Amino acid sequence: MDGIDILIVGAGPAGLAAGIRAKQAAKDAGRELAVAVVDKAPVPGNHVLSGAAFEPAVLDDLLPGWRQVRHAFTDTMVAVEREDMMFLRRKGANRIPPAVVPSRMHHTGDVVISASRLAQFLAEQAAKVGVELYHGYTARSLIVEDGALRGVRLAEVGLRADGTPKANHIPAEEVRAPITILADGTNGVLSRAFAQQFGAAAQPQTLSLGMKAIVQFAERSPFGNNRVMHTLGYPMPPSVFGGGFLYSLGEKTVAVGLILGLDWKYGDLNPQREFETFRAHPYISRLLKGGVVVATGAKTIPEGGLASIGTLSAPGGMVVGDGAGFVNMEKIKGIHYALRSGMCAAETAVAALGDGGAPGPLDGYRERLEAAGVLADMRHARNYRQAFEKGGLFLGTPLSLVSALIPKQLGHHHDGAATKRGARLNRPDPGRMDGATFVALTGTIHREDEPSHIAIKDPARCASCQDDYASACTNFCPGQVYRWDGDKIVLSPSNCLHCMTCTVKCPTLNIDWVPPEGGEGPHYKQL
Amino acid sequence: MHCIILVKQVPDVSNIPEDAWDREKGTLRRGLLDSVLNPLDLHALSFARRITAGDPDAKTVYLTMGPPQARDVLLDCISRAPGEAVLLTDRALGGADTVSTAYSLAQAIRRIERELFAGSREYVIVSGMQSVDGDTAQVPPQLAEDLGVDQVAYAQDVHTEPALTFRRIGAAGTEDVTPTRFPVVVTVTACTDTLYAGFHATRAARSATIHTWGAADVEAKSDRVGLKGSRTTVYRIFSPSEDRAKQCEMVSDPADLLRKVQAKYRLASGGPAAHEEGSYALDGREPSYRGELWILAEREGDGIKSVSLELLGKARELAAFLGERVGAVLPCETAGDLSAELIAHGADVVYAIEHPLLATFSPVPFKSAVAAVVRERHPQVMLFGATPMGRELAPRIAYACDSGLTADCTKLEIGDHTKGGHALIGILKQTRPALGGNIMATIMTKDSPTQMATVRPGVFKVPPREDSRTGDVVRITPELAADLVGAQVTPVESFVSKVNIRDAKIIISGGHGIRSRSDFDRLLQPLADSLGDMLGDGAKVAASRHAVEDGYRSHDYQVGQTGQTVAPKLYVAVGISGAVQHVSGMQMSDTVVAINKDPRARIFNYADFGIVGDLETVVPQLTRAAQEAK
């Protein structure tokens, strides 16, 4: 079998859109290109999670007639007919008048989707146009030679916990291609390595953590259908950036979530507990009354915006989607940018491959992103998130609304550094779903006897962290991976949700996370 | 030596999304489950690779039967270990039970032998122990029956020098089986670490040739394949929770729990709880089947295995509804006193089949002897214990008698069924867990002279011995050719109850909720010790299938459908979700306590007392409370 012409790492919306577009563009150019996508999830969509209110226009460009294709994705998609922005007080709630909500934050014309199902759908469409899909393969590192990206090295498999090979061991395989598109998602290990190698962003990436639950009802849900709601305020103290959402996914299903900016200062803030507290709020719990949580998940969102976007292309490589940082926090959206950036990268790749031989330069990627309006949107929203960091909720909210007018880029630090010594939230346990059940409902699985994919760099630092930051990792990890046993941090890597929180939120950046053996991790089906 | 590896595409029952459950109908929407290669087949792949390893001329052929999408599992196999592949796919093959599946696969194997092996008979047919969706383990022995070859079940290890030899778990212990003729069917219970699919191997597999054959391509007769060729039919599917036997009392304080357990423990007698008896009356109607109800009697030491006596009790009960006699078939060298034991436990007639070749179990002679008697006297029901011997023998006898067989029944009843204006009166309704224990299915035999089923040991109660009972003994001396035995068997190690959890009065059983082997040891043994001390009885630690698969305990400790059936006075389920497969192995316990972090865990449906909470907290609390209560 011939070599791979375009290698794509990550089968999320960005990677799959890149794959589909590459095959389309090659066909238009009358060429046959081998396009391969590798992903660590066991099956398509399992590691994809989002809200998600989605601007579907981009799909009309990628897959004309897609709305007519019968699939769980299209069957469960819901048009937004009613939207509310609420401010939650401790007990009550107030509607924020639509007039004061900027037009860019409106959702009319959007659809509510399951991002996991979008990826399942795109994977099917990609297979139809001849994209080679390889699930269950973990890309561990970049192959860089002569100043160019030449492909990726996969994780070796079949190791014992102590790192020695078992009888079924397969050494790290190399997958090479003239052009590699990195679509490894939020704070992706390879996208970060790419930035480090070829040009880092002006500022470190800041992340938010989104937790989500699918609530199922026997009858029509009290929340109703065709509706989205966003909330500000409770349970977050004013210094914590974040908000809640409820999206209807049909008559009997509601997606509920809470997004928290990881630059919180409290060492003892447990986001999963905050999520439970949010759902226990009288106003929210009324809207969810009678429902059963059937699935949960957690994932971070890159929110740094324009200033956290590093080099987008280098010889032999491009970075797309969340991995590049294409999320607009003003709109709280990234999926359509993911799709669009994947398409732009694919078109650039096919053009650069020309009629064979060594690929030409990939500078056209940035031009295509400009033409598609992706970078313009990012520019408009560049200070939105930073305004919150500077001003907190009360000053930040009004400031954020006019953030587009602030001429200079507001700065920020890495999220772990935001944790303040001695700062405690002291949130009481709302006595609802515990962390273990939350993890169980994500369906995450890892081989128990493999080497840990998470490492504490310097265990000595954990001792003082206990007093200073309440052993923050034991609180911030929604996967319950970290436990303090009295004198050290004990890891349960098999609980890991691959959400990437720990890669930035450890106050001393003392945690090393690499993707584990392929085919492991959460099993998101409808998140 | 070539290999044909039988593989199957199954729904991923290890990871069922919540929304795949139709709570109203109590069924599972299979379309929402991922399709995967049957995980137990992975062992067959590693095993086969060891057979072919040293032989450069050896061919490997993967064979599956299924819808066109089943091609995916063949690609998966080739990615893990190279080989050719045959996809047997045809609408006519759909809806097949084990009988029509075995027939269709046998036809495909004949063509593989002719064309891919150029007529060579030097090959081994390797399969996983069972499929995780059907869980019957019937296809390999029935396939062997159709091909007229031997089967080596429960193989664990293989050596190619000096002769190809399989180490397997036999009825009496571990033994080495050296086949003296080929082909031979081997089912694999476990092998070394399963093979990964390398990236480049997977990519290369995309261009592999897959032979796609339909029913006509393998010269399969249309009345013997698919739904039409099936000898069983699913009559009803329902949720395991409908079978819910107990009302669980939720307790939060460990000391309070122990007081309740202690009080109940003193009253309990131990042993299988009295099984609820069904009732049925023909009321003068003409039953659909006539004839005696038989059981296969298995010997153990100088006596009869207790499972055979349990079956006699059940057959007695069912026969009374129909006004028929109960027969026991006893293959042996000489029956001696065993006929009297069978009669005393409920047999009206004992068919003692006596022959020197029947002294120790060997599938082909046993099958030939028993099937001949069944075909001659056509009983309406034939029950087998789901023992190592029963699991090998029953499928072959059923196939040889053109009868349907239902494996591992947890419930047997006599009932009626009307379908399309056609009334079935007084038939045997066979209920068993399916799809990894996630659903229950009631199954009926169709187009069969005899309704056959296997039942796991311990499911029914041994009836009291009545030495005053009388019955007939029919002695049969068959003619059996010595060449019916196609392998040399060398015992390696007999396992005379190395581990016997069935004797324990108290069992503490751990499951998937326990995250590591060290946690398993650290949490459960102290709880067993302290509860044993408190209640003054022996307590043992056991495990669920998940815990065994995770390597926390060996298979000898496994409670459940594919492990042991236990009925202690106290059963404590720690971190066990309560899949029916597990429940079928412990539901006759007197008192059941469930500890689980998930309040919706199905185990609570089968428990008398439940505690919801983190195992790390609750188990040590309970241990301390038991020490204090002593």
Image (spheres, rainbow, N blue to C red):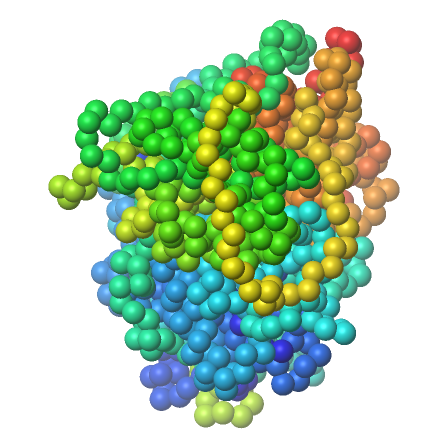
Where's residue B38, x and y in %?
A: 51, 57
Which residue is depicted at the point 33% across and 75% down?
B219
Picture quarter containing residue B630? top right
Q: Is residue A416 left or right of residue B348?
A: right
Q: Is residue A305 left or right of residue B170?
A: left
- Snapshot quadrant of residue B492: bottom right
Against B257, is A402 above or below?
below
The total of numbered circles placed on residues is: 0
Residue B383 is left or right of residue B554, and the answer is left
Tell me residue B293's x, y (percent).
Answer: 39, 37
Say whether residue A433 is visible.
no
Does residue B520 appear anywhere in the picture?
Answer: yes
At x 43% / y 50%, what residue is drawn?
Answer: B373
Say which of B533 and A277 sits in front: B533
Would you place residue B175 above or below residue B318 in this image? below
Tell me residue B508's x, y (percent): 68, 27
- Seen at 40% across and 22% down, the residue is B277
* Residue closest to the far right: A460
- Relative to B283, say whether B545 is above or below: below
- Comparing B54 with A115, the one in front is B54
The image position of residue A79, as x and y in percent, is 26, 47
Q: Nearer the viewer, residue A53 or B78?
A: B78
